[in-house]
Image: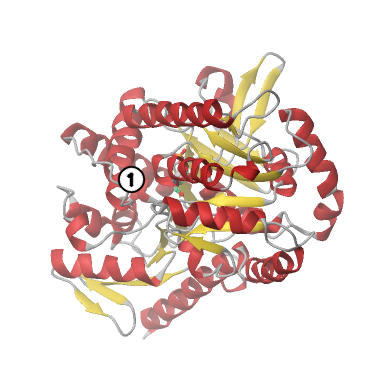
Amino acid sequence: QTQLRGDQVIVVSNREPYIHEQGPEGIVVRRPASGLVTAVEPVMRACSGTWIAHGSGSADREAVDRHDRVAVPPGVEDYQLRRIWLTPEEEQGYYYGFANEGLWPLCHVAHVRPVFRESDWEAYQRVNQRFADAVVAEARSEDPVVLVQDYHFALLPAMIRAQLPQATVLTFWHIPWPNPESFGICPWHKEILQGLLGSTILGFHTRFHCRNFMETVDRSLEARIEAEYSTIRFQDKETLVESYPISIEWPEPATVAAWPSVAQCRQQVIDRLGLPQDLCLAVGVDRFDYTKGILERLNAVERLLEKAPEWIGRFVFVQVAAPTRASLDEYRSFQEHVERVAERINTRFGRPGYRPVHLLAQHHEPDAVNELFRAADIGVVTSLHDGMNLVCKEFVAARDDQQGVLVLSRFAGAAREMTEALIVNPYHVEETADALLRAATMPPAEQRERMVSLRSTVREFNVFRWAARMLADAGRWRLRARVEARV
Ligand code: F6P
C-alpha cells in the first residue's frame, strides 16, 4: 500500500459491503454473505477511497435513497460507498442472466448447463458501461487505481481504459477459470477476453487458473503470450496475469479475547438447536449454491450413519445455507432437492430428541457463524469447484483453542494451501464419509498439530498479504510507466 500512497483507490464490485434495509424501527444495516466482501472490505478500510457497487441487497430503494452515497462502516466511516441502482430488467439480464446463468456455471465445472441469451448479454454490456461511467465520474485524476472485482465486470477494464488510458486497473477474478474448450462455449468469449485485457494486472487465485486463462487467450485472440513473465500483449497493451490467493482478515487478539469461550459457544448451540449433550458436531456454512457440494456432504453423512451405526444419536450435522440468487430455477430446485435429502436422512435415522441433520436456510451474521465454528468438532467444506473458499479459513481462524478438524474438498483453491485438512473428493461418498469418521475420532493431539499448522498458514497469508502483493505489483507498474513516459 505504501507504494500507492497519495493515489486514489476505487473498488468496483457487484455486491455491496453493507446492506441498508428499512426495518420497523428505521434503517437496519447488515453484512451480505459474500467471500468477496469478507476479503475486500478490510483492504478498503485500510486504503479508504470509494467503493462502487450495485445496490442489490438494499431492496427497498425508496427507503434507502439517501444512502446512494454513504460513509461506511457505520460509526467508523473509513471509506465512501457509492451505489448504482439498476432497473429490474438490467438486474435480470446482467446479474441473474449473463453473470449467474451464463458465466457462473461456465467457470465452475459443476454440471449445470450455462445459458446464454442475447438479451442478457446486452444488459451485461449496458451495466458494465454504467459502472465504467461511474468510475470516470469518481476519478479525481487521470490515473486512479481501480480495483475491479469479479465476473460481473469482465468488460469493465477495457471500458475504463477507453476513457482513462492512464488508469491502473487491477482486476480480480474470484471464481475459477476453466480450460479453453469450456470457455469457448460462451458465444461472446472473445469480447470477454478483450474486456479483461484492458486490465493492467489480472489476478486469479491459483496458477492453474492463470494458465487456463492464458491458453484461452492463445486459442482465441491474436495476442502475444510471454509465459516466462506471465504477461499478455494485446493491441499494444500489456497485462500481467498473476496468482494472488485470497484470504481473510486474521482476528486481532482483542477481538478473540472478547469471544465467548468454546465451551459457552457449544452449550449455546446445543441449547438453541436442542441437540444431545454428548455429541460430535459437524458444521457447514455456505451460500445455498449448487457449486458448494451440499448434497454430496449430506450423502456422506448418511453413509457415515449407515456404516458406523454407533454414531446414530450422537453425530449431528448442522448446515447453514444462506439463500442466494433464489429467483433462478436452478437454485430453487437445488434447495428443494437438498431439503428432501435432509428430510430423508432425518426420517431414516432420527428418533425422539435426535435429528442428524439440521438445515438452517437463513442468512447468519458473522458472530453467529463464529459461534457455530467454535462449537463444532468438524468444519465441512465440500465444494465441487471453488475459486478459493474462505469458509475453511474462517473456521480455522475461529479455533484459538487449536481443536477441531477441517474436512476440505480438493476442488477448492484453498486445498493447495491448507494441506493439513482432511482433503476429500466430494464426488466420492465413501471417501468423504470415511474422512468424517476419521475426523470424529481424531485424538486431540493430532487435531492440535493440524490446527496449529493451518492457523499459521492463514495468519501469515492473510487478506492484507493478498492485497499488498497485488498493490505492490501495481506500484511497480506505475513507476515503470512514469519512467517510460519521461524518456
Ligand atoms: O466469490 C464469488 C461470488 O460470486 C462473489 O462475487 C459474490 O460476492 C459471492 O460469490 C456471492 O454471490 P452473490 O453476490 O451473487 O450473492
Rendering coords of residue 433 (x, y %):
51, 51
Q: What residue is drawn where x is 22% and y is 59%?
A: 194
Camera-side residue of 418 and 10: 418
Specify the farthest residue to the top. 24
Rendering coords of residue 70 (x, y %):
61, 36
Camera-side residue of 325 and 61: 325
Colour pattern of the rendering? secondary structure
Neighbour class for label 1 at 10 Å: few (<14), some, many (≥20)? many
- Does residue 137 show up? no
- Does residue 233 show up? yes
* Residue 76 placement: quadrant: top right
Relative vertical location of residue 40 with respect to residue 94 in this rendering, above or below: below
Q: Quadrant of the C terminus?
A: bottom left
Relative vertical location of residue 446 with respect to residue 133 in this rendering, above or below: below
Task: Look at label 1 and name its amino acid.
Answer: Trp
Q: Is residue 404 left or right of residue 142?
A: right
Camera-side residue of 395 and 356: 356
Q: Is residue 319 left or right of residue 181?
A: right
Ligand 1 under 8 Å from disc 1 Cβ: yes
Q: What residue is drawn where x is 39% and y is 26%?
A: 332
The number of callouts visible is: 1
Q: Quadrant of the N terminus?
A: bottom right
Rendering coords of residue 207 (x, y %):
39, 72
Relative vertical location of residue 254 with respect to residue 360 in this rendering, above or below: below
Rendering coords of residue 280 (x, y %):
69, 46
**Secondary structure of the residue carrying numbered label 1:** helix
Residue position for label 1? 104
Camera-side residue of 328 and 222: 328
